[in-house]
């Protein structure tokens, strides 16, 4: 049943149960696991580890590509396994443990984790656990629906556990492009000049003797939780499409736009869906997560190629994409997240990065991660990798949250992930602010006039006028700058009704 998936016969005797493989993970180890935005995570071994920890407590530092599916972060948190976790998560149980200070979470640019490992700025993984569709004749590992950090984890770890997941079709082989940058000081440029360039190998090259265990699984990735576009997300998409049309009319872009990157979540997915009914064509994506909208755009004949680090689909799209993969395969590449998000490549290709803000301020600083400046939501993910180096850094959000208690546009953000220097375009359902070439006082005017919900506009105008009366290049009233957040903490609303 699985012998055709383990093509190096000498490895066949490494097949064992998940519990036996999990027993190789010792208390205090650093573990590098596959998995990026609920795609391609190792499934059986982390589950077995959580079960073991219920009987015999142990702690590990866990690194992945990004978030895990199948409630694995929840299981590991509830079993008390996680002492440290990096570089991204989206699980509500883990989020609570992080915010309670029980799990040390390192919220990191997704392109940076393996670079810091390579330079020994982080402790190398003792063991890697990688989901695969196959092991080749050379003992190389063919990943599944994500590459994430799997290649470097397997290369750096002393030991590797492979989960061969039979639920994934073997025809995923050939989709991946594994390229590992060389070491400094003789590092060469990444030889990627077009979104569809293949620059590496289709499997992760490691010495087969490092593979200490193989676990056979048959469990699907969790479906994405993305919801269908609504009135507000459609309005955000329309504003952005109007802006793109204006850029084309001004001769700054062609109808192909530039390679597109879209972040996780409902809003970014909806914006991409909006491109289906746009005049743009022959679009490309150079992104990290390929969501439903990628395949909707391919089916609509709008998107000719998509490069990413994972494929994360809803239940609706999962079977028809993976059941018909041959239809899409020549239009797709999955790369290590270090390459999908690499600043050098993002700048070279001229990417249009579209990411979601929790809140932004009147000067264009963006908070993507911390509610009221303190409580972690998910993490910065790849948004910073793209925003700083993009041709156009776009941030989208609805103008209000929690039924109108919260304005997403505030006097001063309570935490900064993307500084005003990295942000070009802000969009809410109210409208779009083009910040390019504007000084802070001009930015504030454009943002308040175009992006703020009517319920909060007068209050922001009052704040801005009073701040300007005090003066400064970036006028603020320091005693009031975070008062909206303090009101929210104390009364549940940013402003009194
Ligand atoms: C793996 C990757 O890196 S992908 C690449 C980009 N990565 C990133 O951008 C990472 C950071 N971004 C994110 O984590 C997400 O995009 C978010 C959290 C900012 C937005 O998520 P979305 O699903 O698009 O937006 P949505 O409007 O549904 O908001 C999510 C939640 O935040 C809440 N929220 C939104 N704004 C605020 C705010 N200003 N204050 C408090 N809560 C807020 C919403 O009410 C919602 O809560 P709920 O889940 O209880 O309903």
Image (spheres, rainbow, N blue to C red):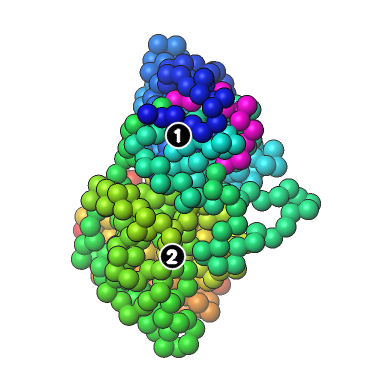
Q: Residues within 10 Å of mark 1 (few under 14, many from 20)?
A: some
Callout 1: helix, strand or loop?
helix
Q: Residue at x 51, y 68 (%)?
A: 351
Residue 428 drawn at (x, y percent): 32, 67
Look at discs 1 and 2 and give the one toward the viewer. Answer: 1
Residue 212 lies in magenta, yes or no?
A: yes
Label number found at residue 487 = none
Whether residue 335 is visible: yes
Which contiguous range is marked in magenta? 204-215
Residue 159 drawn at (x, y percent): 60, 26
Residue 193 lies in magenta, yes or no?
A: no
Label number found at residue 305 = 2
Q: Residue at x 44, y 38 (%)?
A: 133
Label number found at residue 5 = 1
**Residue 358's quadrant in the figure?**
bottom left
**Frontmost residue, 425 versus 439:** 425
Residue 439 drawn at (x, y percent): 53, 77
Determine whether, in the image, residue 1 is placed left or right of residue 352.
Answer: left
Determine whether, in the image, residue 87 is placed left or right of residue 112.
Answer: left
- For marks 1 and 2, the one nearer the N-term is 1
Mark 2, ligand 1, within 8 Å: the answer is: no
* As drawn, 247 above or below 116: below
């Amino acid at each position: 049943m699985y012998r055709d998936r383990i093509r190096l016969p000498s490895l066949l005797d490494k097949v064992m149960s998940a519990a036996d493989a999990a027993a190789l993970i010792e208390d205090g180890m650093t573990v590098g696991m596959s998995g990026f935005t609920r795609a391609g995570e190792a499934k059986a071994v982390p589950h077995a580890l959580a079960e073991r920890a219920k009987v015999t407590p142990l702690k590990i530092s866990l690194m992945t590509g990004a978030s895990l599916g199948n409630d694995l972060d929840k299981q590991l948190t509830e079993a008390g396994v996680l002492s440290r976790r990096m570089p991204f998560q989206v699980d509500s149980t883990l989020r609570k443990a992080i915010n309670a200070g029980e799990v040390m979470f390192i919220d990191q640019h997704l392109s940076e984790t393996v670079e810091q490992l390579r330079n020994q700025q982080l402790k190398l993984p003792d063991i890697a656990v990688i989901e695969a569709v196959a092991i080749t004749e050379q003992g190389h590992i063919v990943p599944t629906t994500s590459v994430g950090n799997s290649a470097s984890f397997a290369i750096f770890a002393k030991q590797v556990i492979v989960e061969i997941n039979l639920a994934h079709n073997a025809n995923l082989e050939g989709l991946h492009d594994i390229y590992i940058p060389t070491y400094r000081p003789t590092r060469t440029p990444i030889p990627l000049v077009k979104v569809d360039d293949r620059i590496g190998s289709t499997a992760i090259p490691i010495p087969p003797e490092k593979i200490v265990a193989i676990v056979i699984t048959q469990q699907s990735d969790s479906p994405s939780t993305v919801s269908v576009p609504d009135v507000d997300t459609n309005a955000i998409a329309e504003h952005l499409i109007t802006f793109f049309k204006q850029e084309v009319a001004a001769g700054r872009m062609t109808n192909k736009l530039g390679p597109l990157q879209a972040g996780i979540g409902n809003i970014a997915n909806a914006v991409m869906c909006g491109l289906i009914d746009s005049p743009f064509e022959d679009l490309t994506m150079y992104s990290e997560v390929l969501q439903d909208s990628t395949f909707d755009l391919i089916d609509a004949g709008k998107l000719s190629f998509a490069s990413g680090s994972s494929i994360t689909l809803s239940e609706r799209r999962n079977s028809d994409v993976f059941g018909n993969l041959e239809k899409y395969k020549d239009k797709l590449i999955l790369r290590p997240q270090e390459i999908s998000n690499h600043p050098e490549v993002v700048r070279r290709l001229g990417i249009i990065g579209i990411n979601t803000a929790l809140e932004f301020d009147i000067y264009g600083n963006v908070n993507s991660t911390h509610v009221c400046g303190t409580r972690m939501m998910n993490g910065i993910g790849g948004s910073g990798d793209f925003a700083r180096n993009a041709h156009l850094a776009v941030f989208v959000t609805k103008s209000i949250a929690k039924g109108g208690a919260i304005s997403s546009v505030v006097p001063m953000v309570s935490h900064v992930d993307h500084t005003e220097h990295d942000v070009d375009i802000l969009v809410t359902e109210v409208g779009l602010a083009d910040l390019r070439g504007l000084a802070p006082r001009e930015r504030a005017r454009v943002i308040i006039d175009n992006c703020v919900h009517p319920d909060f506009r007068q209050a922001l105008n009052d704040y801005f006028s009073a701040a300007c009366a005090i003066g400064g290049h970036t006028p603020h009233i320091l005693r009031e700058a975070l008062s909206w957040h303090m009101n929210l903490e104390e009364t549940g609303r940013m402003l009194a009704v």
